[in-house]
Amino acid sequence: MESFGLAVNVVFPLLLMMVCGCFMRYKKMIDDHTINYLNKMLFRFFMAVMLFMNTYKMNLEDVLNPQIRKLTLIITICYVFIVTILIMILPKFVTDRSKCGVMIQGFYRSNLILYGLPVFESIYGSDDSGMVSVLISVIIPVINILSAIVLEIFGSSGGRLSFRKILKSVVLNPLVQGPIVGLLFLVLGIHFPKILEDSLRTIGGISTPLAFVVLGATIQLKSIRKNWKYISFTVLGKLFIVPLIVFIVCYGLGMRRQMLVMVLGAMASPTAVASFAMAKEAGCDEELAGEIVMASSVCSLFSIFAWVFFLGTFRLI
């Protein structure tokens, strides 16, 4: 019963915020034009501020924690391995290359910021959330590099990799810049006045509720029917198969409790919203990319509940 309550406490706030977004869309308070602008605000400003503050306020011990460094290395290796295997195998079953690139991205590209931090804080509170920011500061550049490579291979460029383009997409990503600048401030010992700290934390705090409301507003289940085979296969792999494999690896290598919750955020959260924009820019099937984001976001409410309940039952978190 305790595990059930823990799972409800994690999922219910996320569900409620998404329902608010759906309601606003239904009542025509939000349209596609508004959603596009809100996504830009979230991606380019609010989330970057949140990641900056989480990194800026964490302890240097978290950065130097050998368990976190070990976990970051394990997850990075798992990402590279999964992408490599999918690049070799998936084209044999999915002949449409524009769909293939989108599906590969859908398999591994997690919404770590949007889901990882709230899930971690729901279970362990905000005091240790700096550990998640350390993970994010490394994992997001890795994810962006892998996404750029995958979409260059399967996109309109015809498999010609542009390392300049890949480097540019990583360096100019606000979600990479935020934690890196925060880490610089932390290492150099630069401190803001309390009034500015509190203001920046309030600004960063807008990102999670607003992002889930916007995500709820984007969900339109009727558009999923056309590509349901591709979507169901990708979502099953993203929310259950890939996380299970990585959980087994991490558990076997001694990861426990907080580390496993970070694995949950990194591997079992739904496909990131940014995958849609990247697929569109690369000339891949952006419609399928958007549908995978929507379907995985809806299904993740049940899968995250199941994962938290399972891990809580066996006292792994």
Image: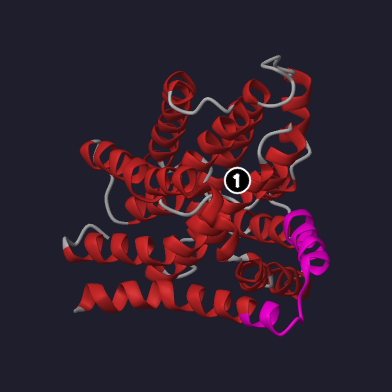
Q: Residue at point 33% right, 51% down?
A: 260
* Secondary element at tag 1: helix
* Residue 66: image location, x then y, percent: 39, 38
The residue beneath circle 1 is 288
* Residue at left offset 69%, top offset 67%: 204
Residue at x 16%, y 60% (from the top left corner): 314
Name the spot of residue 64 as percent of width and height, x first: 47, 41
What residue do we see at 74% from left, 68% from top?
200
User: Which corner quadrant holds the N terminus?
Assistant: bottom left
Q: Does 160 sit left or right of 309 as displayed?
A: right
In the image, 20 versus 251, the foreground residue is 20
Q: Is residue 41 magenta?
A: yes
Which of the 4 image quadrants contains residue 279?
top right
Q: Is residue 64 left or right of residue 25?
A: left
User: Which of these two is toward me, 138 or 53?
Assistant: 138
Magenta span main SS: helix
Q: Is residue 140 magenta?
A: no
Residue 133 lies, in percent from the top left, at 55, 52
Question: In the picture, which quadrant includes the C terminus?
Answer: bottom left
Q: Is residue 268 above or below residue 21?
A: above
Residue 282 drawn above or below residue 45:
above
| Magenta stretch bounds | 23-45
Where does the image place residue 308, in percent across and percent down from the top left? Answer: 31, 64
**Can residue 225 be seen by looking at this rendering?**
yes
The residue sitting at the left extreme is: 314
Q: Is residue 36 left or right of residue 89?
A: right
Q: Please indicate, yes or no, whether residue 120 appears anywhere in the rendered image.
A: no
Check the image and report above or below for 176 versus 310.
Answer: above
- Residue type of the residue flagged with mark 1: Leu
Q: Nearer the viewer, residue 249 or 282?
A: 282
In front: 246, or 25? 25
